[in-house]
Every structure is written in structure tokens, then in C-alpha cells.
Image: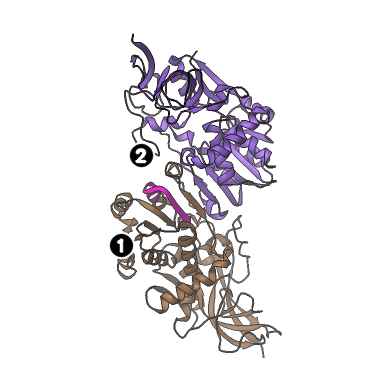
Chain colours: A purple, B brown
Amino acid sequence: MTQTNRRIVLARRPKGLASPEDFRLEEVPLPAIADGQVLVRNRFLSLDPYMRGRMDDAKSYAAPQKLDETMGGGTAGEVVESRNPRFAAGDAVVGMLGWQLYGISDGSGLTKVDTSRIPLSAYLGSVGMPGVTAWYGLNRIIAPKAGETIVVSAASGAVGSVVGQLAKAAGCRAVGIAGGPQKCAIVAGEYGFDACVDYKAGRLYEDLRAATPDGVDGLFENVGGEPLDASLRRMNAFGRVAVCGLISGYSGQPMPVTQFRSILVNRLRVEGFIVSEHLDVWPTALRELAQRVADGSLRYRETIAHGLESAPEAFIGLLAGRNVGKQLVALD
Amino acid sequence: MTQTNRRIVLARRPKGLASPEDFRLEEVPLPAIADGQVLVRNRFLSLDPYMRGRMDDAKSYAAPQKLDETMGGGTAGEVVESRNPRFAAGDAVVGMLGWQLYGISDGSGLTKVDTSRIPLSAYLGSVGMPGVTAWYGLNRIIAPKAGETIVVSAASGAVGSVVGQLAKAAGCRAVGIAGGPQKCAIVAGEYGFDACVDYKAGRLYEDLRAATPDGVDGLFENVGGEPLDASLRRMNAFGRVAVCGLISGYSGQPMPVTQFRSILVNRLRVEGFIVSEHLDVWPTALRELAQRVADGSLRYRETIAHGLESAPEAFIGLLAGRNVGKQLVALD
């Protein structure tokens, strides 16, 4: 008996903004698993800004997403059949199985997770890649000292929200930049940042200056463009900038930086990073993140789209900032 | 008997490009020295790009040059009278005595130098602040490994010429960027860089690409603007960028950086620095630089203007790139 899988493939490379027509939903046969393999029913797809870069056929840190193949990406689900001694049916697992209902894995890159204290979906957010991204950039690049001021852009997002909460836990002043009053209310209220600047209010630099009376010692950059320039203008001597993402330019928009001079004048250290290249920190980071989520000291939000077919629109919405917190697709 | 000193003061703050009217030559009385002091007859003034920044009344790493006071700057000269036990008449010394014929010092910041193997003027260039600047940015920020490609802008200048020669000595491919065929001929010929790209030839990126077939691992940035953008486009993964100067923006020109994205895509580390904040490396660096100048393995050029009154025009020429190598004023 042949089972059927449903998946979304990249149908063509986007020109500028991604559009629904760049994707295609397919039904394909699901082969029987071989010895050593595991069949996983995905329950959540992780949508992340980095995927936009992979959709282009340009030099980047990751190989481009191939045309007519399943869109890659993080997944959380459960093992439904296993011919691998490390896994058993019923195991909750996270992996990189992509935009499809079922994934087959040889077990590499597949991790069993404990859902007794932490919901499965959180392993794609605060207790997963976005959380470790926040942890690495903050602790290993910015290395904050108590009393310093840390600014993070896209502060209501899956990464930014963790950055600010960890910075607060380290005794810092945490200032977020986010788009719109709703997101800012969550950042300053629910996540406990000291302040949040709404970049859509039209007074970005002035508002950031007011929110950072002692200047900025650490910047965790997710956006680029105007938020980056405003933050660079506020940097203190010997500040550190972790360049995690530049989402404002991901769809090919020009993104000139006018305040590069701050790097010289303030003797900044600016570092780009990709969390998957720092696997050594993952166990330490995940232990701390899991503990904080379990004890309620690290809060998060999720925006959940339902059904595989909703993934393209949800991804487009993510790039436009329409989500709050971690953007997921639930495969009910 | 009252002696007379001649000096150049900042008469007003430049708007944009510096002009001769921003400076004023004065004759002032030269006081007798007090106990503990040293009277120095300056023989050479060092002209350096950083001075332009100090002429503005803006936040920078150094306090602004005060109006109506002697222009600050490095000097080399000889002690003519000493009431300080560390110095004797006839000693060759370097210090920061500014744009004047005579300077009085309490000995702090004044260093005796040995002119038996190294000419006095070189202590303002390859064996002075510019040389240590090159040494620090290359060794402590770029940290080149043999076989890597190092690019330096303003490659014919006092700093850039040392960067490339030290990079060659470290087994690297050294590629310079300079303005015009004359400078490029010196960079590639006399200084022994592997290649020099003439940014005035109108094919900067294409020529740089051809000169860096394996990409760029280390960038020593002195200029900003188009050379910086072209170099950022050529960076390899995990490249290092030492931001030493951004002379193309020193007179207030806008200097947007379009290739900031390379910092993320290539996981670069970008660091601004000021050599005067790293006094710990000076002895080590100066020892190596002095040895290399003395044995002829580190070559340099000087552009020498004559007479105190020539300093403003020489400084304006330096900012416009009209010098080759270290720009000095000889006070004959």
C-alpha cells in the first residue's frame, strides 16, 4: 500500500518580494522506510527569515534552496515508524525535515525532545534555533556587563524577544525596536524590556535617543536600514554589534548604511554570525533556555498558521513583519 | 632677552573641505623654560588625516582642536635646552608638540630616538604612529595567516604602505588600492605588493576582483566609500576588517556603505581602532618596525613641504591625496 505525502516545493526563484506563485503544493508518494530510517509526522513547521536568502541563487552562507524540491526548514513532530534503534514510535522530535507532512530521516540531525515541561512548538523557538541565536549573539559577541544598555531590533520576534529577556537577566537595560504599538506593548509589557521604540512612529532616532540616555553598549541587529543607522549613532565607545540578520534587505531592497563611521569613531567590534556554525554552544544555551521557559522566566509568543497550504502566505507575512513572536505552521 | 616662536593656530572650524583661511600663522613670545622642562626645536611636523576630525566640534574619539591654539600634532626635533635630567641638549626627540618651531615639554610624551641607523623623519612614519597603526590593525585585528589575501586602501600612504609590506613578510598576498598610476607603480614596485588597483581608473570592482582571485581574507580600511564597498564584496567567509580610517568622509561627505550585508553573509569581524589606545603593543611594534627600516626590508616614501607656513596647504593636499607616502613639513 503506497502512502501519500504532501509537500511544498520552490516553483521558481522570487524576484524581489516572495509571492505565493513562487511555491507549489504537491502530492507525492511516500516510500517505505529503509533500515536505519525513521518516519516522522511533522506537527509544526518553523518559518524563519533566513529562508528568503536561500531562495535566491546567490552566494550566501547556505547553499541555495533547489527548485522543485521540498522547501527546507526546521520541523517538530513525532515518530510514527522507526527502523532506527535511537528512536521509537511516539517520540517527539525536532529536525530539518522541511515543508511537508511526513519526513524520512536517517536520524542525523534529528533530536528527541521532552514535551513534559515544554510544549513541542517551543523547540522551534525559544528553546530552539532562534533561542540559541539570541544566546550566542548576546553572550559570545556582545558579552554584556551589568548596567550596560543593549538594543535589539525586531524585538518582538522569535530571536529579539529572547535577546532582551536574557539581557535583562544579565542586569542590563534592554531596549527594543519593533514595528507598531501592538508589538511594542508586548516587548515592554510581556517581555519586560525597559523600553521599546516603534520604528513606524516616524521619530526613530529621537525616540531611541530618549530610550538610551546612557548610549548603547551592545546592539543585536536583525533588521538593517534605518533601525541600524539610528542604533549606530547611539553607540558608546567600545560597543559591540552582533549582526544576526538584515531582514529589511532580504528581498533585494537596497540597504545603504550611512553611519558606518561610528565603527571607527567609537572603536566598535561588529560581527556577523550564523548560529549553525557554533554547535559547541548549543547544549549550554539550550539548557539555560529550557530552564527559563520551564520556570516561566523566559516568555514567548507564537503566530500559528494552520495547514501546510498556509505556509507560503505565512512566510510572506513573516518577511513583512505581520507575525508576533515565532511564526509557525501547524500541520493538524 | 625674549625669544620669538612661530606657530599655526586653528582660526576657525572648516565647513566641509579645509581651506587655508581656517589657519593663522602667529609670532608669539617664547617663555624661558622652568625646572623640569625641555625646549625642543622641531625639525619635522607630522601631518595625519586624523587631524581633520579634530578640527570639527563633533563627538569623536579625541577632544576637538581648540580654536586660536597651536594645531596639535606629532613632531620630531632636537633638544636645545633642558632642565630635565632625562634629556640633554642635542638629543633627538619625538613628541606631540604641534605646528610650531619650538615646543616646551615637561618630558611626558617626549621620547629620545636613535638617528644613527634611522633618519629622524622616519620616527614620524614607518617607525612611529603610522607604522604602529599598520602593525596593530594587521597583527591584532586581521591576524593574517600565510597564504591569505590582504587588501589595504590608501596603499601608498604612511600606514597602508607598511600594512602591505608586513603582510608580504607574513606570507600573504598583499593587494593595494591607491589613486592613480604613479602611486600604484610605487605600491606594486617599490613596496612589493602583489598587485595595486587604481581606484581612479573607473573599474574598481572589476580590477579588484581580478587582483584577488581567491577573495579577500583581511581588509585594512583607510578610506571608506567605493573602495570599502568593493572590498566588502570580495570578502571571504570569516574575513577580518580593521577600520583604521575613513578619509573619504573626513570633510563631511556622505559615505553610505552599500555592502554592509557582506558582514552577515560572510560572518565578518569588523573592528574600529585607535592606535593610541593600545600603548601596550608600541614597544613590540616599534622594535620590529625599526629593525625592518634599518635593514632595508621596510621601505617608505615621504612628501616633504618646507617651512611652517606651508603646513596648511600640505595638510589640505594630504586630505586630497596629493602626497605620496608620509606627509611631513620640514622646519629648516
Q: For the residue marked with disc 2, what is the amino acid? A: Lys
Q: Chain of mark 1?
A: B
Q: For the residue marked with disc 1, what is the amino acid? A: Asp
Which region is colored magenta? B230-243
Tell me the residue at 65%/35% (across/down): A165
Crowd class of label 1 (few under 14; some 14 to 19; many from 20; radius 10 Å): some
Between A330 and B128, the residue placed more toward the observer is A330
> Helix or strand or loop: what does disc 2 sit on?
loop
In the rendered image, which quarter is residue A202 located in?
top right
Q: CA distance from mark 1 to mark 2?
A: 26 Å
Majority secondary structure of magenta residues: strand
Residue at image mark 1: B194
Q: Left or right: where does residue A122 sit relative to residue A174?
A: left
Position in image of residue A248 (x %, y %):
48, 34
Q: Which mark is residue A59?
A: 2
Single out the residue that lies furthest toward the bottom: B1
Q: Is residue A21 magenta?
A: no
In the rendered image, which quarter is residue A294 located in?
top right
> Helix or strand or loop: what does disc 1 sit on?
loop
Q: Is residue B231 magenta?
A: yes
Single out the residue that lies furthest toward the front: A85
Q: Are marks 1 and 2 on the same chain?
A: no
Q: Is residue B48 visible?
A: no
